Image (cartoon, coloured by chain):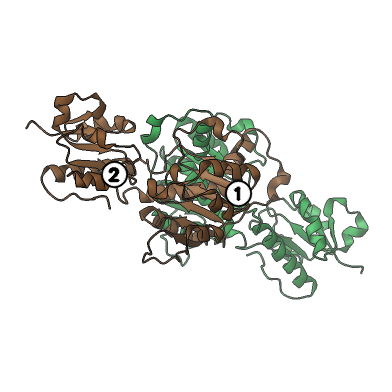
Chain colours: A green, B brown
Amino acid sequence: MSEPLVAISARILTGLKAAVARAGVDVALAWELGEADKARVRCLLHAGEAHLTPEVLQGFPNLGLIAVMTAGYEGVDVPWCRSHGIEVTYAGGVNADDVADHAMGLLLASSRDMHEQDRTIRDGRWRLEDRLLPQPSLTGRRLGILGLGYIGAAIARRAEPFKLQVSWWGPRPKNAPWPRAESLLALAQDSDILMVACPGGPETHGLVSAEVIAALGPDGMLVNVARGSVVDENALIAALKSGGLRRAALDVFQQEPTPADRWADVPNTLLTPHRAGGTTEGVPNMVGLALENIRLFLAGQPVASPAP
Amino acid sequence: MSEPLVAISARILTGLKAAVARAGVDVALAWELGEADKARVRCLLHAGEAHLTPEVLQGFPNLGLIAVMTAGYEGVDVPWCRSHGIEVTYAGGVNADDVADHAMGLLLASSRDMHEQDRTIRDGRWRLEDRLLPQPSLTGRRLGILGLGYIGAAIARRAEPFKLQVSWWGPRPKNAPWPRAESLLALAQDSDILMVACPGGPETHGLVSAEVIAALGPDGMLVNVARGSVVDENALIAALKSGGLRRAALDVFQQEPTPADRWADVPNTLLTPHRAGGTTEGVPNMVGLALENIRLFLAGQPVASPAP
């Protein structure tokens, strides 16, 4: 067999091709390959939210590894892959600190309406009388975290010195210093702020439903740094418009890029374009771990970070 | 002598008159009083950044207490007041948590350009290719705090789980878990982010000079939640425009409200209108402490929070 080839299989990773080539890897873009080259592909370098169907995967007859460079990998059916002899690796906790930093930034900036306050000054609308207009204090507020993986736990640790009362819910009990709620609905009922930090995929699709949003209530706040699919976005928008929910800060959306007009008349929202994990250090670290998994796999050794 | 009167002596506190009256206090606005009523004034309720000159104070011949409801009190000459038999109280650490929350929000939101990212989405400019554009990670960055009072220490505690390396400088050594730099200039040289959290007033006027800003350097960031007077704002703007400093996040300004056109062409700035301490809980707590000081003073007892 000719030299093994690594193929980038998600279009948003196109920009990484040069960096991967500089690392000495024979790399190509999957959608540019003909049959002969497809047969050389032993590894895919993938972004976890992009869907890899069996039909696509069967186009690579010698595929042995999907190295997902993100923390989420809901676009890859891991049991199907493993039953077809394809290993799947992921980024694990590599960018958990960066995502947690972004999550706390969204929480803090949104609770003080910083993006709108900035605009108030730039539009010449700052009035001294507004100095004492009330805005919420965080001290003592209840922060509920949906999903206590690497990212959820990193958020919880950051939230503690802000004197936020942390609790969480996930399907499995964990050995953690924060109390676990009975259910997601109970978590929302007992929280002022709900932080979504669980994986995407079918198991969590629509988990933050209209009912959960209503349980947060008219003073409640939702922050999502996980996946847009976890939240019923239509229900969220309706609740924000009706006053059923006070505010939302979102890094992820049902559709990305999210249409601008979808948010034009939705009050109290702070939106960032799925940037939580993409930092100067985080991206190279994620690429580095994916390449390390590829190197180990091609050397016939156990991979470093198999998907759970 | 007739009933003692409390006079509000700073115009930005005008909106508090009703709340103070509801607390059972005989209260008036200082600038509306005639000579007879001025003689009844035993206490002023004040905002610390507003200047109280000896000329103004001498208009209240029976004044015994200036209850400053803010943490800063640079507009009041405490030694002069005490030598004239007037006690001065302040808010101490009452709103330190709220100010520290805002400070961390400014740091996090600015480092991720959240206000501009929000606009990117709303203007329909989100492009998937930008997903991997590098942005700074905070992990391991050096945070220098100017002033380790209630607020500075509250910021330091919040910064630790973000894996920021905290150091500080102030004129006096303190028993604190974070290292003290040799000087402010040394602090700036060894910091990626400089957080201004010291008192205002003549002693700190212009402390963050062009030289200190230059020491932060082209990747540096300045956050100010203290007083605009501490920073040479013209030098700051020049450094941001020339690329000598990367970014600034400011809640306080040389002049407030700051003119909108002053910031129109200054890149990488996040601006909030002096709102760090003004929360739903913080304002009542500050008013409550000021009223408690007034109550104690009028009862002939030691005040609760004398200005240091």
Q: Residue B105: where, in percent of width, then height?
A: 49, 48
**Horizontal and vertical percent for residue B193?**
54, 54
Picture residue at 89% right of the left edge, 68% below the top: A3
List the residue tagged with mark 1. Answer: B245
Chain designation of label 1: B
Seen at 49% across and 43% down, the residue is B250
Q: Tell me if B119 is positioned left or right of B80 in this view.
A: right
Instruction: Please report, as a chain letter, where disc 2 is located.
Output: B
Instruction: Give the labeled residue for mark 2.
Output: B77
Quadrant of the image occupied by residue A252:
top right
CA distance separating discs 2 and 1: 35 Å
Identity of the residue drawn at 19% across and 23% down: B34
Q: Nearer the viewer, residue A214 or B112?
A: B112
Residue nearest the viewer, comparing A1 with B174: B174
Mark whose residue sits in front, 2 or 1: 2
Asked whether B258 or A274 is in front, the reply is: B258
